[in-house]
Image (spheres, helix red, strand yellow):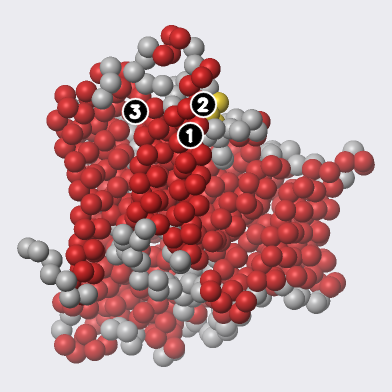
Amino acid sequence: MIEGLLLGLGTAFSITNILMVVGGCLIGTFIGMLPGLGPMSIIAIMIPIAITIGDPSAALILLAGVYYGAIFGGSTSSILINAPGVASTVATSFDGYPMARQGKAGKALTVAAIASFCGGTIGAILLMIFAPALASVALLFHSAEYFALMVVGLSAIAAFAGTGQVGKALLMTLLGLIMATVGEGALFNLPRFTMGIMDLQSGFGFITLAMAMFALPEALYLVLDPARSNSGKANEEIKDLRITRAEARAIAPVVGRQSIQGFLIGVLPGAGATIASFLGYAVERNIASKEDQAQFGKGSVKGLAAPESANNAACTGSFVPLLTLGIPGSGTTAILLGALIALNVSPGPRLMIDQPEIFWSVIISMYVGNVILLVLNLPLIPYIAKVLTIPRNYLIPFILFFTLMGAYIGQNNATELLILVGFGICATVLRFANYPLAPLLIGFILGRMLEDNFSRSMQLYDGLRFVLERPMTMGLLALAVLLVALPSYRARRARLRSQGIASGD
Amino acid sequence: MALDRWIALIVLLICLAYGYTAFFTMDEGLPPFMRRSPIWPSTFPKVLSVLTGITALLIVIGVEKSDGSIRDGGINYRRLGDYKIGQAAGLLALMVAYALLLRPMGFLLSTSGFLFLSATVLGERKWIRLLVISALASGFVWYLVQVVLGIFLRPLPYILT
């Protein structure tokens, strides 16, 4: 590990890479604050830039910096104007916004920044410990196990979707997998499902799809419902960033607990930062003393620190499956995976052996990024927050333009823009009906790998025998079935019981 | 029938067409040596079409009922008329126009046009400020993409170059 750390230090502390972290964090904070552009859209927009850099370590450092910068920016807009730019900072607004209303915006931002810093740093330490261990286990995996593992990952994403949503999430995942089969497959070199359209020969562009699934619907929501943007409200002065010793003592155990819990939730595929932050908030409220409990929702520092440390730790945690197994657990890491593939890096257990400098420099850059968010961004926040005063009439055209540019630069093809608009409309309609969109994108990105591993195991074992002959594959596949079946079964039973029908057992 | 079940029905129809292709028409041109392989290009799509069909059907017949509530400040699609649907449609039309005109009109003209018109659709009426901002922004982005990133973007209309 020491060897790896030194290698990472050597790579991460080059001038370019430090610039990448600083730039990434600043850009992320800046854009993450805007309503309508979450981390997924920002990273998708940044991918063409990252690819032009050429060096995979630098590119991943930049994108990771953008990622946690965006989460930080999202909490800032949650606290200042109660308009979370990012789903995972919704819980931050529960106590952060009341604090800002009481004139303690500066203090709330400091608590959020410190909690994020600790969450991110503890997460990075845990990542450093867990990832190599998991990778060495993963080296024993065959393509059959990989196939099964991806199926487990995809089912877990559906299973975590929530009550009444499992079927919808599953359908979206499958639709993503279907979309991945369009174009030439890696194993066969035959065009499939292109309907004779030349532009579909190489399949759908994943940046286009990412933009269409996230950036465009969010922008259209802003257009449809002007109340969402809330911009132009943050005119209050942000002052007095200091916190007292007593407050620091109050949040210390919260931050410690939530960093570890958040990290573990982040590692699970499909759970991610949003669930981690809500769960962190709920857990801390339940275990708090009576008088503290009454404060929750009215501007409690504990209630602010809990989701902030949890969501940052979860972001770091979501890098574990990405870097060790090459399987993304969230929409954002799915986009990062797409970027890595575009840079000719295949994340997975061999990454630590073949290109250890990428892995370790990303970890080191996480520490650097967290420090930068704390010492550079926090004092700058009053100035960066000015971005919130951009009027809607200017903000929305630029969001749409950046969405178009992101899709265009990646492929240099104007047809891609028409596909973007078409899919964007479909995605907006899907959002109207509460269909989750992240599973579709994850399914799309994993689709090709899933099929390749499936085909390879079919060829090696001359048919489906690989399921029976490899107990681990069978176990994983059984787990996948259980993951999907259990929540829908329990939801159904709960519904029947609420209708007064006996459940039978 | 609620919107989510209509969507599932549409997905089911797409899936039927997809499955038909996978099961019946795709393998016609397959060379004989590939027919001996345990896996065909159509194998994975076949599996997918069956699974998707079942899932979509389950949603259509309503096995798993969703509560139908609007989440996280979402939009109630049953009252779309209450929202700024005209603005949204106008912006989408502008995006399509931008896609079609980007090549022939060149980047600078089409981008400043897009920014100017979409802000106008949203209700901006300070024309001069808007014009200056759109022109400056498109010039800046062009410089960034073409010179800094080195990705070619035709700046001027087709006829001028």
| In the foreground, A396 or B138 | A396
Instruction: Look at 45% across and 36% down and name the residue there.
Output: B19
Q: Which mark is residue A453?
A: 3
Residue that lies at the very extreme toward the top in this rendered image: B33
Amino acid type, callout 2: Thr
Q: Which mark is residue B20?
A: 1
Q: Say which element carries label 3.
A: helix
Instruction: Look at 82% across and 46% down and name the residue there.
Output: B106
Q: Tell me, yes or no, whether dots 1 and 2 are on the same chain.
A: yes
**A152 sits to left or right of B49:** left
Q: Say which element carries label 1.
A: helix
In the rendered structure, the residue with mark 2 lies on which chain? B
**Coordinates of residue B155 in the picture (x, y in percent):** 82, 45
Front of the two marks 3 and 1: 1
Quarter occupied by the C terminus of chain B: top right
| In the foreground, A231 or A13 | A231
| In the foreground, A405 or A369 | A405
In the rendered structure, the residue with mark 1 lies on which chain? B
For residue A247, what is the image quadrant? Answer: bottom left
Instruction: Report the label total.
Output: 3
Front of the two marks 3 and 2: 2
The answer to whether mark 1 and mark 2 are in CB contact below 8 A is yes
* Crowding near the residue tagged with mark 3, few <14, some 14–19, many ≥20 C-alpha atoms within 10 Å: some
**Coordinates of residue A252 in the picture (x, y in percent):** 22, 71
- Distance (Cα) linking label 3 and label 1: 24 Å
